[in-house]
Image: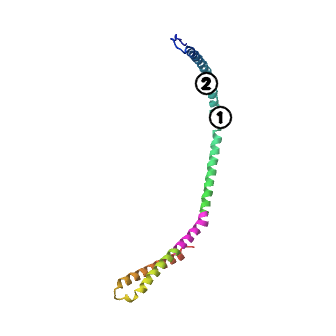
Amino acid sequence: MIVAFPLPYFPLRKRATQFVRLLHFSVVKYVNLGRKLGRGTRAAAKVLSGQAQNAAASAREKAPVIAAQARELAEHRHTVTRRVSSGTRGFHRGFWKPFTRAVRALWHEVTGLFFGIFALFFAEGLYRVRHAWKFGPEHRHFVVYSIMTVLFAYFSVSAFVSSRRSPH
């Protein structure tokens, strides 16, 4: 129920009256709307409750069938997993192992080449100071060049030997 109070002198009295009428109409309209929605909500709740009970009953009936399907799916997944793992093993044996062997041999040959280049560099320095092998101002350089030449020649030869020794 809306209580209307007399409005004091107000230049926009006509608009104010229209607003009060509109407010009264809106309140009445919302009350009727609420009643209608309440009835509809109760009816929908009854329908949904019945459907939920029917769905629960059908789920109880279908549970053994679904469990059997789940077991079949698990077995299928297990066989697929086994096939994929055997396929990856075949890929490893057929491609990856030969590829890594070839790359390893190539790596040993390249490092052997670089060690050989360094050995040649130190051998050239050794040749320059060959006259100071016993005594002289360049004797210390002669010793360093000879040690480094032998060391890098050993690295080069061992790299090529390990390249040839890698399993084929």
Badge nearest the viewer, 1 or 2: 2
Q: Which residue is mark 2?
A: 41
Among numbered discs 1 and 2, the one appearing first in the sequence? 2
Vertical placement of 15 versus 163: above or below? above
- Judge by depth and name the residue closer to the eye, 144 or 50: 144
Residue pictured at 61% horizontal, 56% vertical: 82
Residue plotted at (60% across, 55% down): 81
Q: Is residue 79 magenta?
A: no
- Left or right relative to 164: residue 75: right
Instruction: Return the mark for residue 29.
Output: none
**Mark 1 secondary-structure assignment:** helix
What secondary structure is marked by label 2? helix
- Report which quarter residue 97 is drawn in: bottom right
The magenta segment is 91-108
Where residue 102 appears, x then y in whole percent? 57, 71
- Quadrant assignment for the N terminus: top right
Q: Is residue 80 above or below residue 59?
A: below
The residue type indicated by label 1 comes to: Ser
Number of numbered tags placed on the structure image: 2
Residue bearing the label numbered 1: 58
Nearest the eye: 143 or 79: 143
- The location of residue 121, given as percent across then percent down, is 45, 80
Would you say 41 lies left or right of 143 here? right
For label 1, the crowd category at 10 Å Cα-Cα, with few meaning under 14, some 14 to 19 and many 20 or more, is: few
Displayed quadrant of residue 134: bottom left
Residues at marks 1 and 2 touching, judged by CB atoms closer than 8 Å:
no
Q: Is residue 128 above or below residue 101?
A: below
Q: Which amino acid type is marked by label 2?
A: Thr
